[in-house]
Image: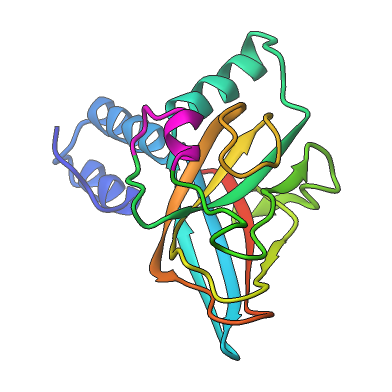
Amino acid sequence: MLRFSSLAEIHALVTKRQLSVMDAVEIAMRRGRRRKRWKGWFDVEGSILGRPFSQVACNQLYDQGEQDVLEGFFRNATLPTDFKIGLLKTSYALLETDTMTQVAAQELSNASDGGYAARATVTRDATGWPMSQLVSGDWQLTSLQVVWTATGAWTDTAGYMFLMSGGNTTPGNTTGRIIAAAPLNPTRQLQAVNDNVKVTYNLKLQ
């Protein structure tokens, strides 16, 4: 089947009788199926040595996240009481099949990265996800902003952010389920007291 850049191009070919109506319908349906997908991303901002930064990082959705979303909605599976957002070292490498065992092994720690004493909690309610609205024709959720403030220079460089469900806030704990993660590019290493990293998570079906 040929690929077309727009529905207007498909319509023009049908009008010129260069494409059958049946083929046009099939192409349009395929385009619609390709468009509908989970899109998640982290909005990141902060300050290092007084220099502000901001960036957007698109996520990798893990197998556990895919399973939980589908089974929670369609099969009445047990839903998490809350979510957590955390930071990982640059030595971690994204792998869709990973569980919290692999992810937590590369998490930052308060011992090496003062101020990273806990994963940030995002409650499963309107407080944890204050924005829920239609954005450009697609429904979008946005979490509250979570913040880590350094109590001194960090030993580790933060290379990834992650979103998990359940478990607890202790860095390195392997309980809970990994939903998504995304790379920080460029990576960030806090250098002084009051340097900070602020993160929100966004998702939409589009």
Q: Nearer the viewer, residue 143 or 23?
A: 143
- Residue 102 shown in magenta: yes
Residue closest to the far front: 111
Q: Residue 57: x, y in percent? A: 46, 60
Viewed as shown, does residue 128 lie left or right of 27?
right
Residue 93: within the magenta? no
Q: Residue at x 67, y 41 (%)?
A: 170
Measured from the top left, where is residue 42 in percent x and y?
55, 57
- Across and down, in percent, residue 162 comes to 53, 46
Nearest to the observer: residue 108 or residue 4: 108
Span highlighted in magenta in the image = 95-105
Q: Where is 88 relative to 190, above or below?
A: above
What is the x, y in percent for residue 65?
52, 29
Nearer to the camera, 77 or 16: 77
Q: Residue at x 45, y 63 (%)?
A: 156
Side (left or right) of 71 relative to 121: left
The quadrant of the rendering that contains the N terminus is top left
